[in-house]
Structure formats: structure tokens, C-alpha cells
Amino acid sequence: MPTPNQENFKYYKKAESKALEILSEMKAATPKKMDIELALIVAIFELHKGEMPAEAISKIVLGHLETVEPYYVSQAPL
């Protein structure tokens, strides 16, 4: 039986897979990376809209960036 952490990770991986699928569709819709970047950030704000102030959402985004950045730094080509 999966632990709560394993179960949460499974849900995260499903959401991540869907997000990458959406990213692929967005790349087909526009060649401008900034358009895609801003749209993805707006989606995060929309996810939390009406539940918390924009400043709190910004802190969530920054916290997530601090969490994932080390992973991508370690993936950089040498």
C-alpha cells in the first residue's frame, strides 16, 4: 500500500505530465517564449484567485522556484 508521500508524488507526476502536454500545445500556438511563460504564471494566479492575495501567490511561486532550481542547475550540461 502506498504511503501518503508516494500517493502525493503520484498525483504530482500526473499533473506534471499534463502540464508538459499543455506546454507542447502552447509551443505550437506561439513561438514567443515570453507569451508562454506569462500564461503559465497567470495560470498559477488563477488557480489561487479568490483564496489569497496576489502577494501570497507570488511568495508561493518564488518558493517553488527556489525548490526546483537546484534540480535544474544539477542538470546543466558541463
Image (cartoon, rainbow, N blue to C red):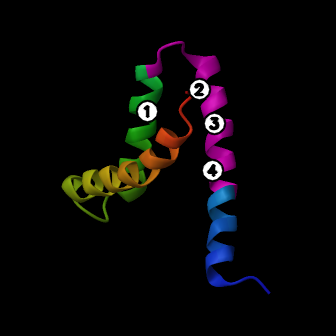
Residue stretch rendered in magenta on the structure: 14-33
Quadrant where the C terminus is found in the figure:
top right
Residue lying furthest front in this view?
A: 78
Note whether 53 is above or below 34 in the view shown.
below
| Residue 16, disc | 4
Q: How far, Cα to Cα, is label 4 from label 3?
A: 10 Å
Q: Main secondary structure of the magenta part?
A: helix
The one of 61 and 28 positioned closer to us in this rendering: 61
The one of 27 and 53 positioned closer to us in this rendering: 27
Coordinates of residue 68 in the picture (x, y in percent): 46, 50
Q: Residue at x 26, y 63 (%)?
A: 52
Residue type at mark 4? Glu
The residue tagged 1 is 39
Q: Residue at x 43, y 22 (%)?
A: 35
Q: How far, Cα to Cα, is label 1 from label 2?
A: 9 Å
Residue type at mark 3? Ile
Coordinates of residue 5 in the picture (x, y in percent): 61, 77
